[in-house]
């Protein structure tokens, strides 16, 4: 397919991503709150966000908690609460005690290699591991926390092998 | 023995050993009574059980956080969508930070046209995109690397939410317990303001540019799968 013409700087399209991989994509914005009702009232009314209680198996709090973890649709999304139209990120929000951490991102990393290998490469480039590496199993959550070379905290997430590659978000440059 | 379980409520399929079946659906939190079971036959893609997907409920109470299909978002507006992340960098770590995202995270990036090359505002494509530097596939974001020293608010805003109108949004921000940290300003031809929610999270709001045609993939409002 011919490239569209564009007048957007830098006058070229972004590079192609031909691998069957979502490595490097910031998949969710991570927010924190101290008062659930205040948080919910603000975002539902100001931005029209839709929220659902994130299951514990996906990293959420216990079902029915007074301080639930939330998966948030900030734009058009489908039944798994992943975005369905391109161009926006959905959010996860969790209750915190003490100081509110900065909002950050959860980026997806290589599915086909151990988290430890990906983190080791990041450390070579000046990142720092925060806390421990996960014990990897067939479970649902395999994650690590790092600081980038400028000290920004963010979360790395390795998708479990349940990905079917039929999901709308699992697209890559096939042409 | 490994089997494939498909949740009748949300349609999510997953494969686990029988003795490791979760009590609640990992995707929607429904009880395991809702699982439809079939033998493992080599891959999830080869499963034979598929359930109809749920649809948005126009009468859903937006304060109810139990499982439901996300709402139908309205047409011809991108109000409320989280459109960009913003990560600050230290100017003395600029090249190291750039190399990290380019080489390890595999991002494509450019310094925006009018920014100072000694502390550029860097726009990042983090995955497949269209010619207008918007993501081609859903559920991930593009964003900016911004010099830490270029934040005049001191609040270090970390993401960008698109809105229909800045002033209308600022009124609502205050009404619902937030603060206005910086009124309307322009960067690279786009209008922004900086706000904080009642918790203390800071963010940019970005007014939908007048050049939007509503034909762009990122302007659509398809809100469920068929």
Image (cartoon, coloured by chain):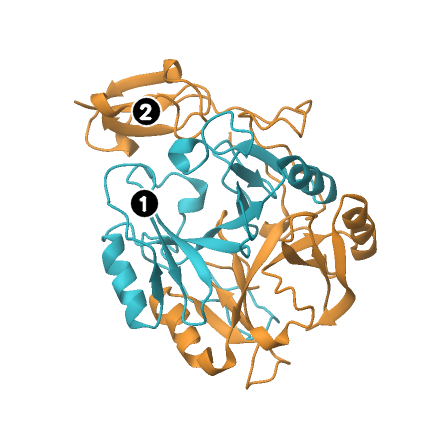
Chain colours: A cyan, B orange
Query: In the image, residue B35 lies at what x, y percent?
Result: 36, 18
Residue A142 numbered mark, or none: 1
Q: Residue B46 at x, y = what percent? A: 26, 30
Q: CA distance from mark 2 to mark 1?
A: 16 Å
The residue sitting at 16% across, 22% down in the picture is: B1
Q: Is residue B75 left or right of residue A56?
A: right
Q: Residues within 10 Å of mark 2 (few under 14, many from 20)?
A: few
Give percent across and percent down for residue B101. Answer: 41, 68
- Taking the image as drawn, is residue B224 in sight? no
Tell how many labels: 2
Q: Residues within 10 Å of mark 1 (few under 14, many from 20)?
A: many
Tag 2 and tag 1 share a subunit: no
Which mark, residue A61?
A: none
* Chain name for mark 2: B
**In which chain is the residue bearing label 1?**
A
The residue singled out by tag 2 in the image is: B22
Q: Position of residue A161 (x, y in %)?
A: 28, 40
In contact (CB < 8 Å): disc 2 and disc 1: no
Q: Nearer the viewer, residue B61 or A103?
A: A103
Residue shown at 26%/64% (left/top)?
Answer: A120
* SS under mark 2: loop
Residue A158 vertical placement versus B55 (above, below): below
Question: Which residue is drawn at the image coordinates 56% and 81% (left, top)?
Answer: B119
- The residue sitting at 42% across, 25% down in the picture is B11
- Secondary element under disc 1, as helix, strand or loop, is loop
Q: Quadrant of residue B132?
A: bottom right
> Looking at the image, which residue sits at the far front?
A98
**Residue B52 in sight from this viewpoint:** yes
């Amino acid at each position: 397919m011919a490239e569209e013409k564009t007048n957007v700087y830098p006058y070229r399209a972004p590079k192609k991503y031909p691998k069957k991989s979502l490595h490097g994509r910031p998949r969710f914005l991570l927010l924190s709150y101290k008062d659930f009702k205040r948080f919910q009232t603000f975002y539902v009314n100001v931005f029209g966000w839709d929220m659902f209680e994130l299951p514990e198996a996906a990293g959420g709090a216990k079902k029915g908690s007074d301080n639930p973890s939330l998966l948030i649709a900030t734009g058009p999304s489908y039944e798994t609460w992943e975005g369905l139209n391109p161009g926006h990120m959905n959010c996860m929000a969790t209750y915190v005690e003490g100081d509110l951490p900065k909002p950050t991102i959860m980026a997806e990393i290589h599915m086909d290699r151990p988290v430890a290998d990906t983190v080791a490469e990041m450390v070579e480039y000046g990142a720092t591991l925060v806390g421990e590496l996960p014990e990897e199993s067939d479970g649902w959550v395999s994650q690590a926390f790092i600081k980038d070379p400028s000290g920004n905290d963010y979360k790395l997430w390795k998708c479990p092998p349940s990905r079917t590659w039929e999901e709308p978000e699992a697209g890559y440059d096939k042409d | 023995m490994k089997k494939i379980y498909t949740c009748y409520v949300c349609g999510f399929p997953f494969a686990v050993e029988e003795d490791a079946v979760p009590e609640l659906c990992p995707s929607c939190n429904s009880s395991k009574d809702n699982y439809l079971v079939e033998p493992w036959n080599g891959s999830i893609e080869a499963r034979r059980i598929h359930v109809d997907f749920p649809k948005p409920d126009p009468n859903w109470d937006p304060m109810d956080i139990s499982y439901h299909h996300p709402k139908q978002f309205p047409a011809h507006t991108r109000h409320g969508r989280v459109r960009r992340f913003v990560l600050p960098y230290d100017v003395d770590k600029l090249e190291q930070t750039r190399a990290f995202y380019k080489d390890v995270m595999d991002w494509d990036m450019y310094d925006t046209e009018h920014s100072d090359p000694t502390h550029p505002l860097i726009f990042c494509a983090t995955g497949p995109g269209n010619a207008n530097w918007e993501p081609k596939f859903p559920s991930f974001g593009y964003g900016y690397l911004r010099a830490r020293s270029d934040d005049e608010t001191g609040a270090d805003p970390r993401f960008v939410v698109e809105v229909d109108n800045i002033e209308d949004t600022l009124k609502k921000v205050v009404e619902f317990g937030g603060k206005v940290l910086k009124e309307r300003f322009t960067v690279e031809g786009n209008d922004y303001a900086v706000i904080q929610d009642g918790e203390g999270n800071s963010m940019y709001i970005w007014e939908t540019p007048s050049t939007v045609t509503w034909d762009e993939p990122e302007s659509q409002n398809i809100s469920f799968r068929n």
